Image (cartoon, rainbow, N blue to C red):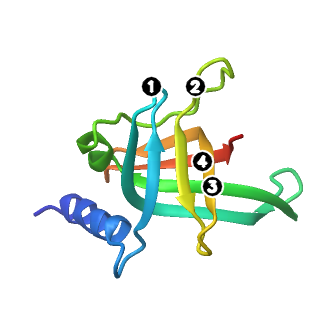
Amino acid sequence: MSLRTLAAADLVYILEDNVTGFGYNITVTDPAGTVKPLIGFSNDISELIDPDTGQVVSGRLASVALVISSLTAAGLGLPVGISDSAEKPWLIGFDDINGNAFVFKVTKSNPDRSLGLVTCILGVYK
């Protein structure tokens, strides 16, 4: 087994193991309205670095990391950011550690096809 294949298998174990790994329940909704439950890594923090000044500022940065083959197996494509507000966005839902539910829209998608991972940067969705 190549090192890349081993790394991809480890990634699935780390991201989708919701017992001893980082796996967390995440709901993905594509623009057509197809809703699928997946397991991945979610992040929602409020301290950011201002790229212009390098200073710590208050803000909100939410993201998820999902295994591409799991999205495909669920019948979904790769989530992408849709900037046209007239079109329906990709939606990502997950609870925080206290059980509060949040729904975000995908604003940016960063696929890593070497390992089979897509990281989605999220924005608040109302």
What amino acid is found at the position of numbered circle 2 in the picture?
Lys
Q: Which residue is mark 2?
A: 88
* Contact? badges 2 and 1 (CB < 8 Å): yes
How far is the residue under mark 2 from the one under mark 4? 17 Å
Q: Nearer the viewer, mark 4 or mark 3?
A: 3
Between discs 4 and 3, the one toward the N terminus: 3
Q: Is residue 26 left or right of residue 47?
A: left
Q: Nearer the viewer, mark 2 or mark 4?
A: 2
How far is the residue under mark 4 from the one under mark 1? 20 Å
How far is the residue under mark 3 from the one under mark 1? 20 Å
Quarter of the image with the N terminus in it:
bottom left
Dot 2: few (<14), some (14–19), or many (≥20) neighbours within 10 Å?
some
Q: Is residue 118 left or right of residue 17?
A: right
Quadrant of residue 82 within the rendered picture: top right
Residue 121 got which mark? 4
Q: Which residue is mark 1?
A: 32
Q: Which residue is mark 3?
A: 102
Dot 4: few (<14), some (14–19), or many (≥20) neighbours within 10 Å?
many
Helix, strand or loop at label 1? It is: loop
* Contact? badges 4 and 3 (CB < 8 Å): no
Dot 1: few (<14), some (14–19), or many (≥20) neighbours within 10 Å?
few
What amino acid is found at the position of numbered circle 3 in the picture?
Phe
Residue 96 percent coordinates (x, y): 60, 67
